[in-house]
Structure formats: C-alpha cells, structure tokens
Amino acid sequence: MAEQLNQELESPQVIVHKLDFLKSSGFISIGTILSLQQNGFPDIETLNACGVYSMVKPVNYNPEYFSPSEAKDNGNVIAPWDIERLTRKWVDDADILYYGLAGANSPRSLKSRLKDLVNHSMGFVTDRGPHKGGEIIWQLSGYENFEIWVLATGNPPAPRILEEKLIRQFYQSTGKLPFANRQF
C-alpha cells in the first residue's frame, strides 16, 4: 500500500490534508491520544513495522491554545510558542495536524515511536524529548481527542521518503506545512 501511495503522491491533485485521504490510502486508526494514554496500544501487526503516522483533529474542532506558561505548567512542552505564532501556524482547512515517521535512518517500529509521542503528551520529557518533533501539538486545548493514524512502509529510507512526500504535497495543497511540522 505504501508503494502505491508513493506513486499517487506524484500527482498534484492528491489532497493529503483531509481525513478521507488517510482512509482511502490504507492508514489505520489506532485511537485517540487519551485512549492510548489510558489503554495502551492495540495489538496489530502494523505497529511492529517502520512507517508513517498522522495526527488528526476531531470534526468541527476550533483551536484554542495554551499560553507558554500554561504549556510549561502542563509539563509536556519543552519549548512553547507564543499564541500569536501558533495562530499563524494553524491551517484552517486541514484535518491533519502532523505527519511523522518511525524508522528514519534505522529500523524502528511505529509502536516504539508512538510510545515516545504518548509519553511526551503525558509530560514524561527531558530537554530533548522523547518526541520533541511536533510538540506544539500539546499547546492545543483538547489534544487528548486527536486521533492517530498509521501506515506501515518498508525499512529505511522508505518512511522518510514517504513522510517528505506527504508534507510537500500538504504544502502544495494548503500553502503551509501541517500545524505541528516545522520542516519537510
């Protein structure tokens, strides 16, 4: 499925900022941040592979932001942004808030990477992470209701190649990077 998706992303008409794209491209929902915090991860083979993942906002979600001091008090944002900067970064018409990967340079499972993400959301952090990429997501009120979608790929460099294509296509469609991504 990931190989076919790589080919489809060559077309500028692919709308990668909407939930329907994930559904039609073979991504699998593994639950909300809250359900993963409380219940752990589902027992599915996909999570044992390298791959890409996405974080999706709920339908009709309107962003409200934690201030830098509130984010620091929450304990899950290492380097918070001011609200004005977060507001400029928001992508109005996008369902997708973030694209990430597991297995950039060496084989790493989606489950391992996403455990880092969930631990970071709960405030189990050091000055380096464990999942510093995309951490401004935790400055959005209601982040515990954001849903995680996953897609297995081959071993490296496949996850990085696909993630970069997804982010570039997102940028071509919206004129911005996904909310919590800072680079291609």
Image (cartoon, rainbow, N blue to C red):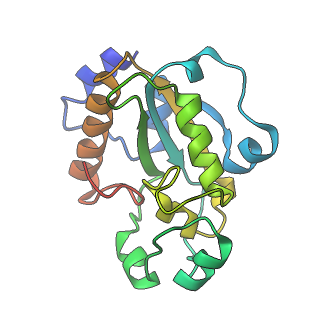
* Nearer the observer, 40 or 78: 78
Q: Position of residue 15 (x, y in %)?
A: 33, 41
Residue at 32%, 16% in the rendered image: 4
Task: Decide if residue 144 is on the left or right side of residue 158.
Answer: right
As drawn, 13 above or below 157: below
Q: Quadrant of the N terminus?
A: top left
Report whether residue 14 is seen: no
* Nearer the observer, 130 or 56: 130
Report whether residue 46 is seen: yes
Residue at 36%, 55% in the rendered image: 181
Task: Decide if residue 40 is on the left or right side of residue 15.
Answer: right
As drawn, 25 above or below 120: above
Residue with the most extreme right position: 39
Q: Position of residue 73 (x, y in %)?
A: 66, 78
Res. 3 image quadrant: top left
**Number of on-image labels:** 0
* Nearer the observer, 166 or 183: 183
Q: Position of residue 50 (x, y in %)?
A: 45, 23
Task: Decide if residue 163 is on the left or right side of residue 92.
Answer: left
Res. 163 image quadrant: top left
Res. 5 image quadrant: top left
As drawn, 129 above or below 75: above
Q: Position of residue 120 (x, y in %)?
A: 60, 54
